[in-house]
Amino acid sequence: MDGVGIKRQGRWLIQNISLSVKSGEIVTLIGPNGAGKSTTAKTALGVLKADAGSIKRKPNLKVGYVPQKLTIDWTMPLTVRRLMSLTAKPTQDEIALVLEKTGISGLAGSYVQQLSGGEYQRALLARAILRKPDLLVLDEPVQGVDYAGEIALYNLILKIRDELNCGILLISHDLHVVMTQTDTVVCLNGHVCCSGAPEHVAASTAYKQLFGDTAAESLAIYHHHHDHKHLADGTVMHTHDDDGDCSTHG
């Protein structure tokens, strides 16, 4: 993504978003609620059409996607096996393989309504890797899961990355866990406040402003300055850039 923006009703939802995801790389989007994380992911996928900038994708790119919210009619008797084939026609062997990879092979005949939070997220992840994607986009993939389950799911995501050598674009609020398991962090607040290695972003002034000193102090190694402010229409205005550590755009 290069300088990508989405504008609605005269206001920029995201502006000047530039990032890349390579094979085998985990790129994590962080930021407060309303920062444009899901919008950025949907734009990267082509679900939303960019109003500015450009997006380049690998030819014949195969994508797996776990959305933040998947609306299901919970009165419908939907089994895990049937969930796998709602929008595709995988073989039974392919379904069995992804359920085994995600640790829920014994739940193929179970109804989705009966799954725990962790089991449901594993089912969505299994569905996302059916096509052996080049790019896996995960929007809050551990929501509704307890802490032990979160760790297990993140470890599973790492295992899938290693097996498929796919790029992963991850959105998460679990900063401490994500910071230790990602290659590149992109801090968003309508635009890219800062990006880079986890320890660099965690130590930045922009990160502290968004998540508080307590979160930053436990991870901080490196410092830079937040050199812009947000206007009412979503535009980002520069104030000053002394050291170039935080890349911003107006």
Image: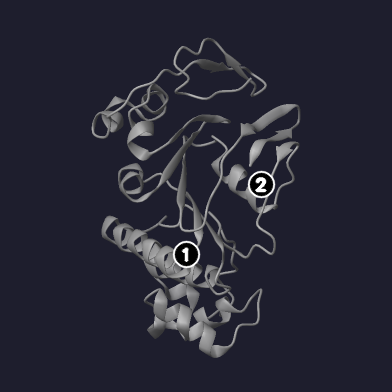
Tell me which amino acid carries mark 1: Asn
The residue sitting at 65% across, 57% down in the picture is 58
Q: Which residue is mark 2?
A: 43
Cα–Cα gap, marks 1 and 2: 23 Å
Q: Is residue 174 above or below residue 113?
A: above
Foreground residue among 223 and 101: 223
Q: Which residue is mark 1?
A: 165
Q: Mark 2 or mark 1, which is nearer the start of the sequence? A: 2
User: Residue 206, percent across and down?
Assistant: 42, 24
User: Residue 170, percent across and down?
Assistant: 48, 51
User: Residue 150, percent across and down?
Assistant: 33, 58
The answer to whether 113 appears left or right of 146 in the picture is right
Q: Circle 1: is it few (<14), some (14-19), or many (20+) Cα within 10 Å?
A: some
Tell me which amino acid carries mark 2: Thr
Residue 71 quadrant = bottom right
Q: For numbered disc 2, what is the local secondary structure?
A: helix
The answer to whether 213 appears left or right of 27 in the picture is left
Which is in the foreground here, disc 1 or disc 2?
1
The residue sitting at 40% across, 81% down in the picture is 100
Q: Circle 2: is it few (<14), some (14-19), or many (20+) Cα within 10 Å?
A: many
Q: Is residue 18 above or below residue 193?
A: below
The residue sitting at 65% across, 53% down in the picture is 45
Residue farthest to the bottom?
92
Q: For numbered disc 1, what is the local secondary structure?
A: loop
